[in-house]
Amino acid sequence: MVAEASNKTISVTLRVWRQAGPNQPGSFVDYTAKGLNTNMSFLELLDVVNDDITRQGGEPIAFAHDCREGICGTCSLVIDGKPHGPHRGVASCQTYVRSFADGAVITVEPFRARPFPVVKDLITDRAAFDKIQQAGGYISVRTGAAPDANANAVPKEDAELAMDAAACIGCGACVAACKNASAMLFVAAKVSHLGLMPQGQPERDKRVLAMVNTADDLGFGSCTNQYECSAACPKLISHDFIARLNRDYIGATFRSAFTPASANTGGGA
């Protein structure tokens, strides 16, 4: 039973993963939080617990956050076994105390994946995503100012799909939810939103090959099409983009086999 949205207060027990550093052993530690306003966000709940820990002279729980508006993707927590918590289409910072029953025991841990090593407590190093993005998630063609870029007609369907893919905030929930720690949904979103735009065509083949191969080199697993990734995504990125990625990758692989390396600048169909 979930607490109703109101100004009532509840008490919960947080079972939090504590780990002093990347190479240190970790364990779960229980903290009791009382008198919580049910309209409080989950990160505010962690703030309250940290205030209590600090007053008692303890080391506060380390967790990452920034915008607290579901935009930046840094609030990457596994709450009761689910990346970002019990609801669909929201980040950890958009999960509220009213989502839990009075007296609930809530387990909180970092994203678990070999390419996302734990830095401390609930903070993981997701620099691997930055490396994938740097491998090909950009365009080098100059599009000029807004009027110049807007002069390129883009079909409405392509524009809407590109916007859907560009909604990815790079939080890593897709990786944490996947039993193989696959980054395919993230890569697919980044490849697709550029590959659907005219400005992204010159490097289309080079981009998909570089980003997929970089993800493999970094230790992310393979996709086995169970779609846990799209179910956990706070922006509800569709797994259909993975199919688009696969088509682009197969096409780019075929074309690269018959194209001199000096001329392999992309331009997929």
Image (spheres, grey):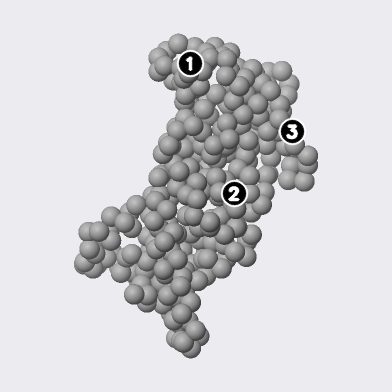
* Above or below, 264 relative to 104: below
Q: Residue at x 48, y 16 (%)?
A: 37
On the question of residue 234 being in view, the answer is yes
Q: Do callouts 1 and 3 mark residues in contact (Cβ within 8 Å)?
A: no
Q: Which residue is mark 2?
A: 179
Looking at the image, how many numbered discs can be counted on the residues? Answer: 3
Q: Which residue is mark 3?
A: 27
Residue 121 placed where, x, y %? 68, 36
Q: Which residue is mark 1?
A: 37
* Above or below, 219 relative to 55: below
* Above or below, 84 relative to 116: above
The span from disc 1 to disc 2 (Cα, nearest Å) is 35 Å
Which of the marked residues, 1 or 2, is nearer the chain's N terminus?
1
- Image quarter where the C terminus lies is bottom left
The span from disc 3 to disc 2 (Cα, nearest Å) is 22 Å
Mark toward the viewer: 1 or 2: 2
Q: Amino acid at mark 2?
A: Lys
Badge 1: residue crowd in 10 Å (few <14, some 14–19, many ≥20): some
On the question of residue 49 being in view, the answer is no
Q: Residue at x 45, y 47 (%)?
A: 230
Which of the marked residues, 1 or 3, is nearer the chain's N terminus?
3
Left or right of 145 in this view: 56: right
Camera-side residue: 182 or 225?
A: 225
